[in-house]
Structures are given as structure tokens and as C-alpha cells.
Image (cartoon, rainbow, N blue to C red):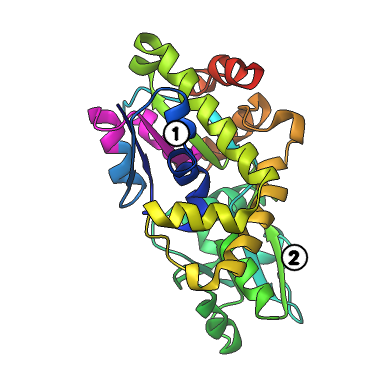
């Protein structure tokens, strides 16, 4: 048996996790696997801490915060080496840099969430503070364009899914990834130090299945993979499956491969060092020994298989 968890339900962004089950890749490694849909990063991290699940997908910020509070978490692979969030503004009135934030009203997804934390890091990088900007919660949907049209905000920070949706709708936007100013591993697979010490074979097997699932997505028919996964998981947005396929291709070509195809799924030490500087500098979380937060021991074994 092996139970693992997404941080937010079964949205299309977690296709590689659903495909590990529906594509039979975990079964091929000898696991009777169960994938749960989480209800937020905090709850997901708590489930990992209690041992209710063995692996979760989180952001690097989530792991830094959890470890700073005493959790013994370790990243065993990085899926998104580039940012999952972009700064979006009108094409005819673009906000082209973090330095342009000064005096602006910036839309964020939620108070205290990832977008506000990334904004803090970007402001710190541009030698500014929260006092230099105004923030407004606008959610994480393309509907935030109404705030731009009404002049209530100057730009907003959203997931790349919103970027693709706006581009598909031919909205005139300018956008750039937050890792221009806040570089860090974006989406990582996390387990506990106890698991890597007591069950190393399980970690390697899980990562072999992850490798097989992502290779299937990179080289197979994404529409078929989505439909197969939807038979096991209720994936929202399947009525617009072509849009979901476009989003996944955008993700695979961009954040998945931002450190080069040869480094796919590896934890990149330089990104972790930059994350430590940015997250610590913005006062979000302090973790003195960043090398303890990740290991490539198991992903290297999986990649060689």
C-alpha cells in the first residue's frame, strides 16, 4: 500500500500524479496506490507529518515554512523548476518589472498565500517593502481581468493556468514569471526524513513511477491521458479538454524544463540556495541548513533505471 496526496483536489495541474495511478505506473512498481485530493497546502503538510500519507506535492515555500516550524521534510524531486505564477498586466499599460510595482495596486490570490509571499520576495529583491504597494485579493481566475479594466488594480499575480486561459481568449496581456525576481524550486515532491531512512526502496519505486508517468505525458497523447485519468478522478474542466491540454503543454515546455531537459526532476542546489536567500530575506521562514531540505540520492537511482 502507498498513499500520497495533492495539495488541492484533482485539478488538471496534478495530472502526473493521477497518471501514476491511472496509467498503472505505481502498480508496475508493486504498489497498491491511493491518491487523495488535499484541501490546501497546510492540511496536506499536516497529513504528511502525521504519517497519513507518504508523499505530497508542495511548493518550496511550503517546505521552508514547515521545516522552520519543526517538520522533518525532505524534497526528493523537483517537478517545476520554474515558477507556476506569473505577473499579468494589460498589454497597453504593462508592468514590466518588480521595480515597476512602486505605487501600484497589485492583485493577489489570497492573504498570506503563495502569491503574497512571492510578492514579498520580489519587493525585497527590488529593494522595496509592502509600504510601497497596495494589495487586493482577486482570486485565481481569468475574471480578475475585470479589476484591470475597471482600474482597480494595475497588475495581478496568478497561476500559469490563468495565463493560458487569457491567451486562449485572446486577451491583450503582458506577463512574466515571478522567478525573474524570486527564483526557487516551484513544485516539489516531499516526504519525511523517517521515510527516506527506513523505506528507501519505497522512495525509489515512487520516483520510478513518477519518471514513467511524466515520460508518458511528454511523449504520449495528452488528451487520451487526461480522459483515462478522468475515469478514476473527477477532474474539473474536462468539458474544455483542449484548453487543459494546451495548459499542460505550456507547463511541460516551460516550468518543467526551465533548468534544461537534462536536469528534469532533479533538485537544483543553486535554486535551493536562492530560495533560502529570498524566503529568509523576506522574513517568511528561516532555515539555516538549506542542504538538509533536499536530496538527489533517490531520483538519481530512479533516472538511471
Q: Residue shown at 54%/72% (left/top)?
A: 240
User: Residue 174 in the image: x percent, y percent?
Assistant: 73, 71
* Span of residues in magenta: 46-69
Binning the other alpha carbons within 10 Å of mark 2 as few (below 14), some (14 to 19) or many (20 upward) gives some
**Which of these two is toward me, 296 or 89?**
296
Q: Is residue 304 above or below residue 145?
A: above
User: Residue 285 in the image: x percent, y percent?
Assistant: 43, 36
The quadrant holding residue 248 is: bottom right
User: Residue 26 in the image: x percent, y percent?
Assistant: 44, 31
Q: Secondary structure at mark 1?
A: helix
Q: Give the residue at mark 2.
A: 96
Q: Is residue 102 above or below residue 127?
A: below
Judged from this view, the residue extending furthest toward the bottom is 150
Q: CA distance from mark 1 to mark 2?
A: 29 Å
Quadrant in the picture for the C terminus? top right
User: How many numbered circles are shown?
Assistant: 2
Q: Is residue 2 above or below residue 283?
A: above
Residue 33 as seen in the image, left or right of residue 207? left
Residue 103 visible in the current orientation: no
Q: Is residue 171 magenta?
A: no
Q: Secondary structure at mark 2?
A: loop
Q: Residue shown at 57%/55% (left/top)?
A: 224
Q: Identify the mark at residue 64; answer none if there is no mark.
A: 1
Amino acid at each position: 500500500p502507498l498513499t500520497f496526496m495533492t495539495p488541492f483536489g484533482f485539478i488538471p495541474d496534478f495530472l502526473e500524479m493521477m497518471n501514476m495511478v491511472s496509467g498503472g505506473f505505481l502498480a508496475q512498481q508493486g504498489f497498491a496506490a491511493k491518491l487523495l485530493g488535499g484541501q490546501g497546502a497546510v492540511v496536506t503538510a499536516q497529513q504528511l507529518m502525521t504519517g497519513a500519507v507518504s508523499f505530497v506535492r508542495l511548493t518550496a515555500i511550503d517546505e521552508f515554512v514547515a521545516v522552520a516550524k519543526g517538520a522533518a521534510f525532505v524534497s526528493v524531486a523537483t517537478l517545476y523548476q520554474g515558477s507556476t505564477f506569473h505577473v499579468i498586466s494589460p498589454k497597453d499599460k504593462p508592468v514590466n518589472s518588480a521595480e515597476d510595482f512602486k505605487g501600484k495596486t497589485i492583485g493577489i490570490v489570497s492573504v498570506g498565500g503563495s502569491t503574497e509571499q512571492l510578492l514579498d520576495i520580489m519587493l525585497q529583491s527590488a529593494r522595496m517593502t509592502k509600504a510601497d504597494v497596495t494589495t487586493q485579493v482577486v482570486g485565481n481566475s481569468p475574471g480578475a481581468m475585470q479589476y484591470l479594466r475597471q482600474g482597480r488594480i494595475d497588475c495581478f499575480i496568478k497561476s500559469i493556468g490563468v495565463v493560458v486561459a487569457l491567451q486562449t481568449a485572446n486577451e491583450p496581456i503582458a506577463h512574466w514569471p515571478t522567478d525573474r525576481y524570486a527564483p526557487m524550486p516551484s513544485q516539489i515532491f516531499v516526504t519525511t526524513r523517517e521515510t527516506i531512512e527506513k523505506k528507501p526502496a519505497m522512495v525509489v519505486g515512487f520516483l520510478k513511477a513518477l519518471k514513467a508517468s511524466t515520460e508518458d505525458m511528454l511523449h504520449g497523447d495528452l488528451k487520451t491521458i487526461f480522459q483515462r485519468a478522468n475515469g478514476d478522478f473527477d477532474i474539473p474542466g474536462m468539458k474544455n479538454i483542449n484548453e487543459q491540454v494546451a495548459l499542460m503543454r505550456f507547463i511541460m515546455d516551460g516550468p518543467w524544463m526551465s533548468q534544461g531537459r537534462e536536469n528534469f526532476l532533479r533538485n537544483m542546489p543553486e535554486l535551493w540556495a536562492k530560495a533560502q536567500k529570498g524566503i529568509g530575506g523576506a522574513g517568511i521562514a528561516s532555515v539555516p541548513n538549506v542542504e538538509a531540505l533536499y536530496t538527489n540520492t533517490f531520483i538519481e537511482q530512479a533516472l538511471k533505471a
